[in-house]
Image: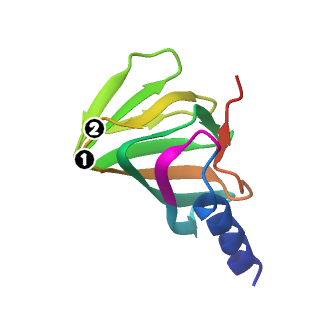
Amino acid sequence: MKRLLSALALTVLLTGPAHAADVGTKVTLLYDHEIPNVPGKSLRAVLVEYAPGGSSDAHTHARSAFITATVLEGSITSQVNDGPVTTYTAGQSFTELPGDRHAISANGSKTEPAKLLAVFVVDTGETQLTTPIHK
């Protein structure tokens, strides 16, 4: 029951209203599983769908989060920390390490939708996967 309530709470956090400046972005939790041979860690997958021209606020992720993101459809423009602004296309991936800042996360197209699969390895107790950076 505790796990079910935790999963429901996480789903509400991820599928509720986007941040105030997020435009045309939908986030859906696809799965949340504890890793049986790594106590205290969970594997969570999130589908991020961007409408044409859609974007997300600058943000960080849970302190423990190691993330690999793969573009499933369209193109995603991303900047992690002070790295280069890069546009990834379907089939390409990038990673984010614990503590990284995701300064830019946007659809690379103004006319076509885009989808991104983000897979998190995170402390099981983490319930907020994304936190906006307030400027």
| Residue closest to the eye, 74 or 90 | 74
Label 2 crowd bin: few (<14), some (14–19), many (20+), radius 10 Å: some
Q: Position of residue 27 (x, y in %)?
A: 51, 57
Q: Can residue 38 be seen in this view?
A: no
| Residue closest to the eye, 50 or 117 | 50
What residue is shown with label 2?
Answer: 109
Q: In this rendering, would 120 be left or right of 53?
A: right
| Figure disc tally | 2
Identify residue type, mark 2: Ser
Q: Position of residue 81 (x, y in %)?
A: 53, 20
In terms of secondary structure, where does tag 1 sit?
Answer: loop
**Residue furthest out toward the bottom:** 1
Q: Residue 112 carries which label?
A: 1
**Which segment is the magenta one?**
20-27
| Residue closest to the eye, 2 or 108 | 108
**Residue furthest out toward the front:** 111
Q: Is the residue under label 1 in contact with that under label 2 (CB below 8 Å)?
A: yes
Asked if the stretch drawn in magenta spans residue 26, the answer is yes
| Residue closest to the eye, 99 or 75 | 75
Residue in view at x 37 percent, y 50 percent: 51
User: Residue 60 occupies which quadrant of the picture?
Assistant: top right
Asked if the stretch drawn in magenta spans residue 44, the answer is no
In terms of secondary structure, where does tag 2 sit?
Answer: loop
